[in-house]
């Protein structure tokens, strides 16, 4: 059967939808056009919209905004970010008080560096709503209250960690909520403190402690344990563990009185040059600068003036000239190998290291993931086990390299470490098996604490 549409019709229907986003007949026509064009994501999005319109025939207009929100979210999940933004905006044009649309739009805008817009939508979201519930897709085994920072930084990445299947997730933007709201929360079985960055958590310490100490429920990643993972406190926390090297680090709260005062602080902390300067509450190398002399450091501090960390730099190049950064994830203090990035640059990022462009790098990572003890050696592996026990986090992680004598060179160890699934048919699909192990271990931890 010949389908009746012209090459320009999709653009015409798109314009009409922008003018009338709730017109069901336009969504029906767009669904047909996208099907013919082979646009799987678009077809699925509009198919979901049509089904929802059918269920909400007599619903008020404000409720129909959820149809457009779900349409946008399908695009979001398929990586079509421009279409996702477009339909989140349409959802908000129908119902400006739809907090979850503001929230997701904020995430998209922030990823593009449009920070002012992102902050505006985020603030609107959390002024409207502080509690977001996500129901389990199967039989509910537990209801978990997840404390988070609505301002979007410092949170533990939980989407690959806490599965939807049996967990009813209650996300609480505690930084936007008053203490009085704590007593009005939906019922929950346990608390996961999802504010894992010690710098961010420090600013909310009183609020988090008010809730966790007064709730009479098990608390995972207690704020007291997270507080010990400040970069400048890790050296002391891990002191005495054999075969562990934690470079000296000092935190500056502001500009020292003079260059001489700066040098005295560095000397007192045992920090020489070269050293790394980085802003608080950042990870993955964001904002980090290597300084070889006090002259360049002093100029940078004069320009910045805010708090920062100064950490002694170690040249951790392997014998083959490459820099290696390993990551282990801790669940209930047990280490799980998560990834290995190999780069020619001392700032090692997994996705800029050219891992998929060099099969030997992937092969080496596979060996690490399948048998970390064999790759790292007994000294390093035993040290990593001791580090997990010393951190004493229910969920956390460590980025590290190996020292020449087979020990562990610690870059950072805290609760913010990301572990996420990748495309099952992509070049990194081998990582999904270890993510499943991590998720299963966390599921067991949740269940054990639910039954307490």
Image (tube, rainbow, N blue to C red):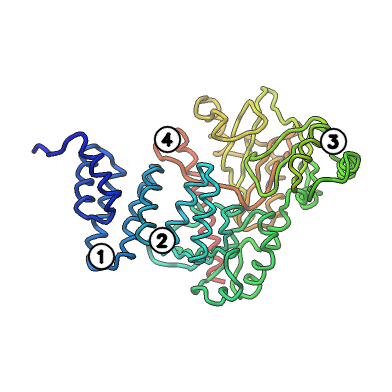
Residue 134 position in % (x across, y down) = 43, 63
- Sequence-earlier tag: 4 or 2: 2
Q: Is mark 4 on a helix, strand or loop?
A: loop
Q: What is the spatial separation of the Cα atoms under label 3 and label 2, in whole angstroms?
A: 54 Å
Choose mark 4 or mark 2, whichever is in front: 2
Please tell me how many numbered marks the rendered image carries.
4
> Which residue is denoted by mark 2 in the rendering?
96
> Which residue is denoted by mark 3 in the rendering?
272
Choose mark 1 or mark 3, whichever is in front: 1
- Sequence-earlier tag: 4 or 1: 1
Per the rendering, the mark at residue 426 is 4
Q: What is the spatial separation of the Cα atoms under label 2 and label 1, in whole angstroms?
A: 19 Å
Which residue appears at 29% of the width and 42% of the height? 40
Q: How crowded is mark 3: few (under 14 residues within 10 Å), some or many (20 or more)?
A: some
Q: What is the spatial separation of the Cα atoms under label 4 and label 2, in whole angstroms?
A: 39 Å
Q: Are marks 2 and 1 in contact (CB under 8 Å)?
A: no
Residue 249 position in % (x across, y down) = 79, 44
Which residue appears at 53% of the width and 30% of the height? 355
Choose mark 2 or mark 1, whichever is in front: 2
- Left or right, 30 with respect to 92, comes to left
- Left or right, 368 with respect to 319, comes to left
The C terminus appears in which quarter of the rendering? bottom right
Q: What is the spatial separation of the Cα atoms under label 1 and label 3, in whole angstroms?
A: 66 Å
- Sequence-earlier tag: 2 or 1: 1
Q: How crowded is mark 2: few (under 14 residues within 10 Å), some or many (20 or more)?
A: some
Q: Is mark 2 on a helix, strand or loop?
A: loop
> Which residue is denoted by mark 1 in the rendering?
56
Choose mark 4 or mark 3, whichever is in front: 3
Q: What element carries label 1?
A: loop
Residue 86 position in % (x across, y down) = 37, 47
């Amino acid at each position: 059967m010949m389908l009746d549409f012209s090459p320009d019709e999709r653009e015409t229907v798109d314009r009409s939808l922008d003018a009338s986003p709730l017109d069901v007949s336009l969504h029906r026509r767009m669904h047909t056009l996208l099907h013919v064009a082979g646009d799987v994501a678009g077809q699925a999005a509009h198919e979901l919209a049509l089904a929802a319109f059918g269920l909400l025939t007599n619903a008020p207009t404000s409720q129909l905004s959820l149809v457009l929100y779900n349409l946008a979210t399908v695009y979001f999940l398929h990586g079509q970010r421009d279409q996702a933004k477009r339909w989140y905006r349409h959802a908000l044009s129908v119902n400006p008080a739809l907090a979850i649309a503001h929230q997701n739009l904020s995430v998209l805008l922030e990823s593009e560096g449009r920070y002012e817009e992102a902050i505006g939508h985020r603030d609107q979201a959390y002024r409207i709503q502080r509690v977001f519930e996500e129901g389990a897709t199967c039989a509910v085994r537990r209801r978990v209250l997840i404390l988070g920072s609505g301002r979007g930084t410092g949170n533990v990445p939980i989407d690959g960690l806490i599965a939807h299947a049996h967990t009813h997730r209650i996300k609480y933007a505690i930084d936007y909520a008053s203490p009085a709201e704590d007593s009005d929360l939906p019922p929950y079985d346990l608390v996961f403190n999802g504010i894992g960055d010690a710098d961010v958590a420090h600013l909310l310490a009183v609020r988090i402690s008010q809730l966790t100490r007064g709730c009479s429920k098990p608390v995972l990643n207690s704020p007291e344990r997270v507080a010990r993972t400040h970069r400048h406190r890790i050296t002391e926390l891990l002191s005495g563990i054999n075969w562990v090297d934690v470079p000296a680090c000092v935190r500056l709260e502001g500009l020292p009185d003079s260059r001489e005062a700066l040098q005295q602080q560095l000397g007192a902390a045992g920090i020489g040059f070269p050293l790394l300067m980085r802003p608080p509450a950042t990870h993955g190398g964001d904002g980090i600068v290597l300084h070889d002399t006090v002259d360049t450091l002093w100029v940078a501090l004069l320009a910045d003036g805010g708090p920062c960390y100064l950490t002694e730099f170690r040249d951790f190049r392997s014998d083959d000239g490459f820099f290696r950064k390993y990551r282990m994830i801790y669940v209930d203090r047990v280490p799980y190998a998560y990834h290995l990035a190999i780069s020619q640059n001392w700032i090692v990022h997994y996705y800029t290291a050219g891992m998929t462009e060099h099969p030997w790098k992937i092969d080496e990572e596979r060996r690490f993931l399948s048998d970390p003890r064999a790759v790292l050696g007994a000294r390093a592996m035993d040290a990593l086990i001791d580090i997990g026990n010393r951190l004493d986090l229910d969920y956390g992680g460590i980025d590290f390299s190996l020292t020449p004598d087979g020990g562990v060179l610690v870059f950072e160890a805290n609760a913010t470490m990301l572990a996420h699934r990748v495309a099952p048919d992509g070049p990194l699909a081998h990582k999904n098996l270890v993510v499943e192990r991590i998720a299963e271990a966390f599921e067991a931890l949740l269940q054990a604490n639910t039954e307490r």
